Amino acid sequence: MHMRIHRDEKRFQCDVCPYKCRSGGNLRKHMVIHSTDRPFLLCKECPEKIRTRAQLTLHVSDIHKRFECYQCHKMCTKNYLIKHMKHEYPISFAQSKISSIEMKMRACRVVISRIIVNQ
């Protein structure tokens, strides 16, 4: 039984799409995206309709939450900002190691300024 994990054996397959997983629990969680019983969750910032709260959180952080590069003021996602900083400003990035709290504060200021501009 335990060796299945190491062999990457995915015995459980979705009947609707090509998704495969190792456990029945993961398959049950996956099946929610195909269910018509549950209502969609609506993104507050765009017309996107999403099935699970986890997917909605990912959508918002990937699509709507932007961080500002303090060097060139480029706006991008947190993951891309880290890659951007490492590539464009490697010495500055290594010295600063921007804290996640500072990044959140910058993102918050951007959202607030966006709201003020849109009003």
Image (cartoon, rainbow, N blue to C red):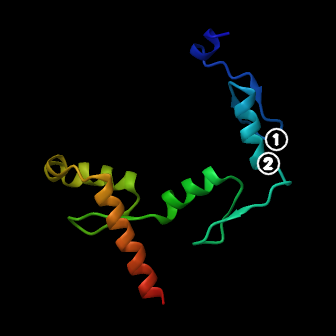
Q: Residues within 10 Å of mark 1 (few under 14, many from 20)?
A: few
Q: Secondary structure at mark 2?
A: helix
Image coords of residue 97 (percent x, y) = 22, 49
* Mark before the other along the chain sequence, 1 or 2: 1
The answer to whether residue 79 is above or below residue 71 is above
Residue 16: numbered disc: 1
What is the count of numbered marks? 2
Residue 13 appears left or right of 65: right
Q: Is residue 60 above or below residue 23?
A: below
Mark 1 vs mark 2, CA separation in Å? 8 Å
Q: Where is the N terminus found, in terms of image quarters?
A: top right
Q: Residue furthest right?
A: 37
Residue 86: which numbered mark, if any? none
Q: Secondary structure beneath disc 1?
A: loop
Q: Nearer the viewer, residue 42 or 75?
A: 42
Q: Is residue 33 above or below residue 65?
A: above
Q: Amino acid at mark 1?
A: Val
* Most foreground residue, 10 or 28: 28
In the figure, residue 17 lies in which quadrant? Answer: top right
| Callout 1–callout 2 Cβ contact below 8 Å | yes
The percent position of residue 111, horizontal first and vertical second, equals 42, 73
Name which residue lies at 37% across and 66% down. Answer: 107
Name the quadrant containing residue 57: bottom right
Q: Is residue 53 left or right of residue 65?
A: right
Residue 34: which numbered mark, if any?
2
Dot 2: few (<14), some (14–19), or many (≥20) neighbours within 10 Å? Answer: few
Residue 6: percent from left, percent from top: 57, 14
Question: Please, what is the three-letter code of the amino acid marked with disc 2?
Answer: His
Identified at 63% across, 10% down, the residue is: 2
Residue shown at 48%/90% (left/top)?
119
Residue 66 coordinates in the image, percent (x, y): 41, 65
